[in-house]
Image (cartoon, rainbow, N blue to C red):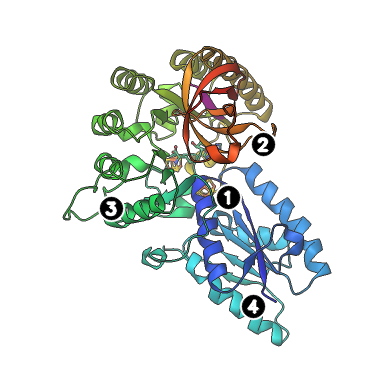
Amino acid sequence: MSQSYHVITYGCQMNVHDSEVLAGLLENMGYRRAGEPEQADLILLNTCCVRETAEERILGRLGELQRLKRENPDLILVVAGCLGQEAGSVERILRRAAQVDIVMGTHNLHRLPDLVREVLTGRNGNGAGTLVEIWDEPAGEQWRQGLPIMRERGVRAWVTIMYGCDNYCAYCIVPYVRGRERSREPADIVAEVDDLAKRGYREVVLLGQNVNSYGLDLEPGPGPGRRFASLLRELDKTQGLARIRYTTSHPRNFGDDIIEAVADCGKVCENFHLPVQSGSSRVLGLMNRHYTREDYLALVEGIRRRVPGAAFSTDVIVGFPGETDKDFEDTLELVREVRFDSAFTFAYSPRVGTPAARAPDQVAPEVKQDRLRRLIETQNEISLEINRAQIGREVEVLVEGEAEKAPGMAAGRDRVNKLVVLSPPEGTTVTELVGREVVVRVEKATTWSLEGRADSP
Ligand code: SAH
Ligand code: SF4
Ligand code: F3S
């Protein structure tokens, strides 16, 4: 009987995609996917440490998984990803979950098969203990080329275009756990996207912590696609593909060339996720974000002028060390001025090793929570107003499948990435619509989604 695995993923899209790669490596070894952790011979947690809450959740889950391990001592428990890469984390992991078999990081994903084999061999003796292998430097990414990636079947596929981050925002641990920026060769990306389109995927999401600096580390070489704007233009030619998205872009170097490329390329969608983090130029300076409130507003304005129908989303941190009431009011004001379609909002969480964690003027937890609540209220009102204004209008939806909470209805995203639930046209089933773009007349709106009826095709 073949062995089975179960992967549990935390964190950002990059981690989600790494999990697809890790699953591919396990499949290559003959492991097969198990739907539930209880059924698996190997459980892998791909972890995140961007905020303390993420870390706590993961350590809690690890604690729970110890029970399965006690019931089945043959179970292999693996912790991979960003948490392992964080200073001091291995001790924390082992304190909570002494029975973990492998702890590995973000730079040695390809070592998973060897590490698993080592555990299996070790067991023939009295191989208790945890195998810890964390690399300080990335392995290079060539090993990824040509490996099976266990992508989720469906309409959308994730494609890494660059690894790491060089921005060193003062609060952020990502550069420490993901390493320096490394861009993939454009020819490899173009080939991968082309192959995905041939295999029926309709949308690709290009991944990087800061996609607009794509290519800056590449040798000047032959052919196009060696900068982000030019890569978008290349990928826009992909036969059979309907949509191209990317995440995340940084407001710092989101140049006119990128705006022009989005405006020109039919497949590249018109939503702009531009994490602002704060509306106070003073705080932005402390955060090492390299733009001011005015720069940000000018960027949004420039995009609106050039790209009709552009929608904006953002990330905001409240309670960064030294943030005053006035700074926070500036953030609220900016949120009202831009009118984001949606926002991811976070209370600042100190991360050991980052400069902001050492700042003396930390904001009290109750103040952070209060600011977070006010920010969320403000944004939710705006999101609802924007969505309600869609009622009566038509949006173009790429159908992904059946709506989660409404059987018989289909769900998908419109061009600007809003979730749309729709009733199929008379005589059409949801299955027939999957992967197709349909025009939907919006009839209802909530803070989070739109609902409507698809025109007959
Ligand atoms: N590379 C992306 C973001 C990656 S992390 C970018 O720069 O846009 C996703 C979000 O988590 C960040 O945008 C930020 O808003 C939030 N974040 C990062 N570190 C944080 C911390 N220490 N505390 C609270 N939020 C944090
Ligand atoms: Fe973190 Fe800043 Fe890099 Fe984003 S750009 S991953 S927030 S350091
Ligand atoms: Fe988390 Fe690592 Fe992503 S810390 S946000 S999973 S890069």
Position of residue 433 relative to residue 126, above or below, is above
Asked which quadrant contains residue 251, the reply is: top left
Position of residue 149 relative to residue 336, above or below, is below
Report x, y in % for residue 160: 41, 51
Where the N terminus falls, by quadrant?
A: bottom right
Tell me if I can see residue 183 in this picture.
no
* Mark positioned earlier in the residue sequence (2 or 4): 4
Tell me the CA gap for discs 1 and 3.
Answer: 28 Å
Badge 3 amino acid: Pro
- Judging by the rendered image, the residue that carries numbered circle 1 is 48
Instruction: Give the left or right position of residue 274, taking residue 152 as reference.
Output: left
Badge 4 amino acid: Val
- Numbered tag placed on residue 186 in the rendering: 3
- Numbered tag placed on residue 167 in the rendering: none
Task: Pick the residue in front: 375 or 9.
Answer: 9
Q: Is mark 4 within 8 Å of ligand 3?
A: no
- Judging by the rendered image, the residue that carries numbered circle 2 is 404
| SS at circle 4 | helix
Q: Is mark 3 within 8 Å of ligand 1?
A: no
Tell me the CA gap for discs 4 and 3.
Answer: 38 Å
Asked which quadrant contains residue 405, the reply is: top right
Tell me the CA gap for discs 1 and 2.
Answer: 26 Å
| SS at circle 3 | helix
| SS at circle 2 | loop
User: Residue 134 in magenta?
Assistant: no
- Judging by the rendered image, the residue that carries numbered circle 4 is 119
